Amino acid sequence: MKLYRQLFFLLSFSFVLISCNKDEGFGGSCSIEGYVYNIIHHNKNYSFLTDTVPAAEWRVFILAGDNGAVLKDIRTNYNGMYRFDYLRKGTYPVYAYSEFPNDIYQAEMVEVKAGKGLNVADTIFVHNGKGFGTSIIQGTAYATFYRRNGEFRDMGYPIEQRVYIKRAGEVVPFDDARVGNLGIFAFNGVLPGDYEIYMIDEDRNTEKPTVPHIVSITITETGIVYQLPEEQEGWETDENGNKKKYTFIINVSV
C-alpha cells in the first residue's frame, strides 16, 4: 500500500510538471513547414543582377521562443522545403543564414505562431555569392599620347591600360582593372572600407613610370555603383561644347 501511494504521488507530480510546462519546445502535436530560397549575387556582370533558386540542403534553425535556445536544426530538401514536427503551441523564431563573401553570416529570420496541426511559415530568403554585400567602383581615364621622343601625338582613351586598387594604408594592390571603351573602368565585388585607386603614368621625356595622384574613396553602402571623383584639370570640351570629366589624366608613350 505504501509503494502504491509513492507511485501515485510520482505520477501525479509528473502530470503537474507536464501541465505547467507551457513553454515552446518539443512534446506537442504542432508542425511548422516552410521554404528557403537562395538569392545568388553574381560578381562578374557589373549590374547587381541576381538569380533566385530553391535553397537545397540549406540549414534551418528553430528557437525555443523567448529562451533563445536552438531547439533543432535541419536541412532543406531539393525544393528548399523544411519541416519541424512535434512542437508545443507557441511562437517560434525560425531562421537560416545568408553568407557574405568574407565569411560573415547574417541570420534571416521569420516568426511563426504555431497552433494545432500544420502551420506554414513565411518564406525565408537567404543571400550568397561573391557579389553579395559588395559595391562597384567606376571611373574614367583620359590620356595624352606622346611619341617616343617626347613629342605630342594625340589625346584619347588609354584603352587596356591598367588601373590599380589597394586598401588604404597598404602598399600592394589587391586587384586591377583594364580601361575599356570611352575610358571607363570598374572594380566590382568591393566590400565596405577605405580604398586608394591609381594608374601608372609615364614621364614623357624619360618614359619612367610614376604615379601622378591617388584617388581615395570610402565604401559605406552595398549594392550601388560608386563614381570616383573627377579630376577637374582634365575637363575637355567635345564638338558639341559638352565638358567631359575624367578621374585620371595620364601620359602614355607610344
Image (cartoon, rainbow, N blue to C red):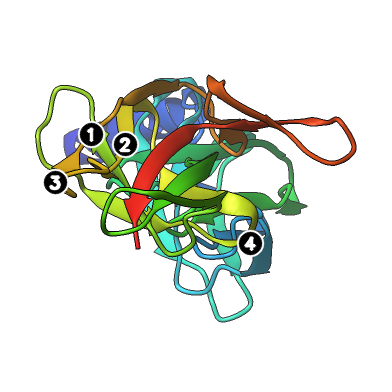
* Of the two numbered discs 2 and 3 in the rendering, the one whose residue sits closer to the viewer: 3
Mark 1–mark 3 distance (CA, rounded to whole Å)? 10 Å
Q: Of the residues under marks 2 and 3, which one precedes in the sequence?
A: 2
Q: What residue type is disc 3 on?
A: Lys
Toward the bottom, the furthest residue is: 78
Residue at position x 59%, y 64% from top?
Answer: 45
Q: Are marks 1 and 3 in contact (CB under 8 Å)?
A: no
Q: Are marks 2 and 4 in contact (CB under 8 Å)?
A: no
- The local secondary structure at tag 2 comes to strand
Q: What residue type is disc 4 on?
A: Tyr
Apparent side of residue 220 relative to residue 191 in the rendered image (left or right): right
Can residue 113 be seen here? The reply is yes
For label 3, the residue is: 208
**Residue 198 circle label:** 2
Q: Are marks 1 and 2 in contact (CB under 8 Å)?
A: yes
Q: Of the residues under marks 4 and 3, which one precedes in the sequence?
A: 4
For label 4, the residue is: 37
* Of the two numbered discs 4 and 1 in the rendering, the one whose residue sits closer to the viewer: 1
* Of the two numbered discs 1 and 3 in the rendering, the one whose residue sits closer to the viewer: 3
Q: Is residue 53 above or below residue 147?
A: below
Crowding around mark 1 (Cα neighbors within 10 Å: few <14, some 14 to 19, many 20+) is: few
Q: What residue type is disc 2 on?
A: Tyr
- Looking at the rendered image, the quarter that the N terminus falls into is top left
Can residue 29 be seen here? The reply is no
Apparent side of residue 104 relative to residue 227 in the rendered image (left or right): left
Residue at position x 45%, y 34% from top?
Answer: 248
Q: What residue type is disc 1 on?
A: Val
